Amino acid sequence: MVTPSQPEPPQEQDDPTAKMSFFDHLVELRKRLIHSLVAIGIGLCVGIYFSDKAYDFIVRPMHKALREAKLQDHLVYLSPITPIQLYITVGLYLGIVMVCPYVFYQLWLFVAPGLYRHERRAVTIFLVSSVALFLGGMAFGYWVMLPMTLNFLLTITPTTTYGPMLTMDGSLDMILVILLGLGLVFQLPILIFFLSLFGIVTPRFLWSNFRYAVLIIAIIAAVVTPTTDALTMTIFMAPMIVLYVLGIGVSALVVRKKRRVATTAGAGAS
């Protein structure tokens, strides 16, 4: 029993939700959902308003590649409704991306009170690292991978005999596949972190199987990249190999932390 002169147990100090009823949790969840939905609605309106500029930015590498290949740098559409559909689609994507930080913040406000301090710190690091790696993968795809891929695809066909008639929707789909695919590929250190956390892999295992990892990365690069030239595959493989090595370092930190906690727990038990 806790008297006024005694400090509260650490668990109650670290968990403000211990005194919240089930109904209070539902009210809090309803509040966070309403805030998130309102933000998404505002973001969609803003995204649709700027969708034309966003679309021009996304397909800019395609226009540049067409000009460098001495081709007409305009895209066509096969249906009168296609431009409107594309602008709405781009606006939806843009709006969701803009409000994602606020939605994650609302989720954090709902979840954080029920977590311990070390758990809050771990979740924060995970979210920040995951978003940073995803944006880094998309940036690498937009400024490095995409221009080289488009230049290769537009120069392998003889322009004196054939000429491309690229559509707006087809170009957008191809660009988004490359950008989103690289954003997901850059999550490799996060995947290794969780595998190490659950004891599925270790730094020794990852390092001893490095050559097999390079082989798997080469196969993934051959499947994902729309070109077959060695240069593009090498450029795609390079960041994946770097991320794998980074993942080995992350795994080493996780294993070292687990051993330290186990040693501290064993010393405390004895």
Image (cartoon, rainbow, N blue to C red):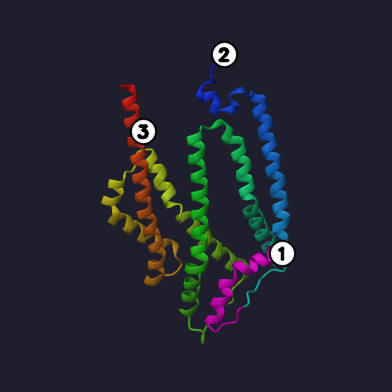
**Is residue 270 at all visible to an observer of this figure?**
yes
Q: Residue furthest bottom?
A: 160
Magenta-colored stretch includes residue 56: yes
Image position, residue 249 (x, y; %)? 35, 50
Which quarter of the rendered picture does the N terminus lie within?
Answer: top right
Magenta-colored stretch includes residue 76: no
- Crowd band around label 3 with a 10 angstrom C-alpha radius: few (<14), some (14–19), many (20+): few
Q: Tell which circle, 2 or 3, labels the residue nearer the N-terminal end.
A: 2
Question: How far is disc 2 from disc 3 in space, using C-alphas?
Answer: 32 Å
**Residue at 54% across / 20% down in the picture?**
7
Q: Quadrant of residue 221?
A: bottom left
Q: Is residue 244 left or right of residue 182?
A: left
* Circles 1 and 2 in contact, beta carbons < 8 Å: no
Q: Residue furthest front?
A: 5
Image: magenta residue range: 51-73
Question: How far is disc 3 from disc 1 in space, using C-alphas?
Answer: 57 Å
Q: Amino acid at mark 2?
A: Thr
Residue underneath mark 3: 261
Q: Amino acid at mark 3?
A: Val
Which-is-in-front pick, marks 1 and 2? Answer: 2
**Is residue 229 at all visible to an observer of this figure?**
no
Q: Which element carries disc 3, helix, strand or loop?
A: helix
Q: Nearer the viewer, residue 73 or 210?
A: 210
* Circles 3 and 1 in contact, beta carbons < 8 Å: no
Q: Nearer the viewer, residue 130 or 4?
A: 4
